[in-house]
Amino acid sequence: MSFLENLKEFFTIAKQTNFDLAQVYAQTPNGVYSTGLVLLVILLVVLFFIRRSIKISSAVKLASQIQNSKDINEYNEKLDKLAAELPKRGLKVAQTLNAQKNEILEKELELLEELNIKEKIDKYTQIASKYELIAKNSKKYAMNELTSYYDQTAKKLLEVNLIEDINTYSKNAAFNENDLEFVNSIVKYANTTPNPDEILNSVIKEINSYSYAYNLDLVKFTKALTKDESKQVYENCTNNLELVLTSGEHKVSEIVLSYLLEENKEDVYNYISTLENKTYLEDLYHNLFAKKDDIDLDLAFVANETKTNVDYASFIDKKITDNWKDLKLMKHIIKAPRVLETIGHVSYRSVLERIEKLETQEENNKTILEALQTARRAEALAKEAKDIARSK
């Protein structure tokens, strides 16, 4: 018999036996199996619709309550789930989301306010991506208002809101070493966009509003930047600091110079040797010259061609006199720029003669030492040969 005939037989016999399943099964087992299968299918369909109804209710509740999130991470988790559920849970979810869309956005912007700029960049990009997904997944419901809103808002979050937050950060930042990770995060994000300069120009403008000659925090910030991570900001700050140190025109504060002496002495030597401001050069002379136990720093002053009222010759004469046995130091001093012009030919020739004598003495001492070492080796060999002869 066919499936339908089995069902018909089941109900006919069941009616005759007053639904005594034992008697029914004895007379038509196939009818019982067919009926059981139908009931199972009905049960599964009921369960499917109940489960679907629960999921729809859950998605509707999620859409209506996402704005109650306590922090940005909870908000992100719910938004992620909502974006995934939207195409599977029907029109009602889309309608609820459409009704709540403004409140959801307001809550998101409120939660983002609590974050630093590095965290904001991370969260803005995540949320914009999920908004794009919501716009894509809502197209099946032909709700142009919902789709258009999330498509446009995804762009606005990055092109307007995030840019405003970056500009606000830049205007309030001190640009010290603590800002390094934040600036690097801005640079990294900017370089993922079609036009990085639109973002970075405002940041660089704010950085350059501070003085590279007087602001020690800015100098430390500049020295902490790296070419790989800081890219355009590194290039800007490094070039500006170099310009300040090499132009010969800028007054660089003693605090900055003292710091640079610890970081890169050559920058300071070059700055002092090329400084053209007579008054400021003399001020630095009184505070730095012969004060740091750094002969190269002192010689940088000597190398400067700017006319001043400073007597460098006496310093050099005293330095050589006090260290007349230090051949290496005397050679270093005598070879330095403008030492000849500073101490004059007579003194210069006298120092050269002294160096020549020391070199001769050093060479003689070396010859004598080698002869003594040779004699000691010969004596040791003779003693060893004598001991061998005695042992025989």
Image: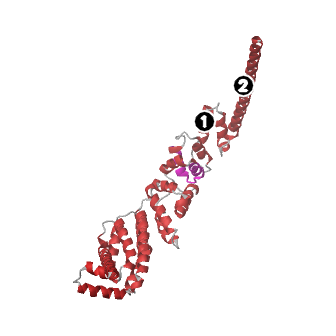
Q: Which residues are magenta?
A: 266-286
280 relative to 348 in the view: left or right: left
Residue 130, horizontal then vertical, whole percent: 41, 73
Q: Which residue is mark 1?
A: 319
Indicate whether 336 appears above or below 48.
Answer: above
Quadrant of residue 378 within the rendered picture: top right
Q: Which mark is residue 369?
A: 2
Please name the residue shown 52% across and 68% down the image. Answer: 191
Q: Main secondary structure of the magenta part?
A: helix
In front here: 9 or 96? 9
Q: Secondary structure at mark 2?
A: helix
Q: Position of residue 16 (x, y in %)?
A: 24, 86
The answer to whether 122 is drawn above or below residue 97 in the figure is above
From this view, report whether residue 278 is shown above or below residue 38. Answer: above
Name which residue lies at 46% across and 60% down. 210
- Foreground: disc 2 or disc 1: 2
- Kindly tell me whether residue 113 is visible in this rendering: no
Q: Amino acid at mark 2?
A: Leu
Judge whether residue 279 is colored magenta. Answer: yes
- Find out whether residue 212 is within the magenta segment: no
Q: Based on the displayed image, in which of its 4 quarters is residue 330 positioned?
A: top right
Q: Secondary structure at mark 1?
A: helix
Mark 2 and mark 1: Cα distance apart in space:
30 Å
The residue positioned farthest toward the left in the image shown? 18
Count numbered badges in the picture: 2
Residue 345 at what x, y percent from top left? 70, 40
Asked whether 16 or 103 is in front, the reply is 16
Q: Is residue 331 visible?
A: yes
Numbered label attached to residue 134:
none
Residue 164 falls left or right of residue 301? left
Left/right of residue 62 with respect to residue 138 in the rendered view: left
Amino acid carrying mark 1 in the image:
Lys
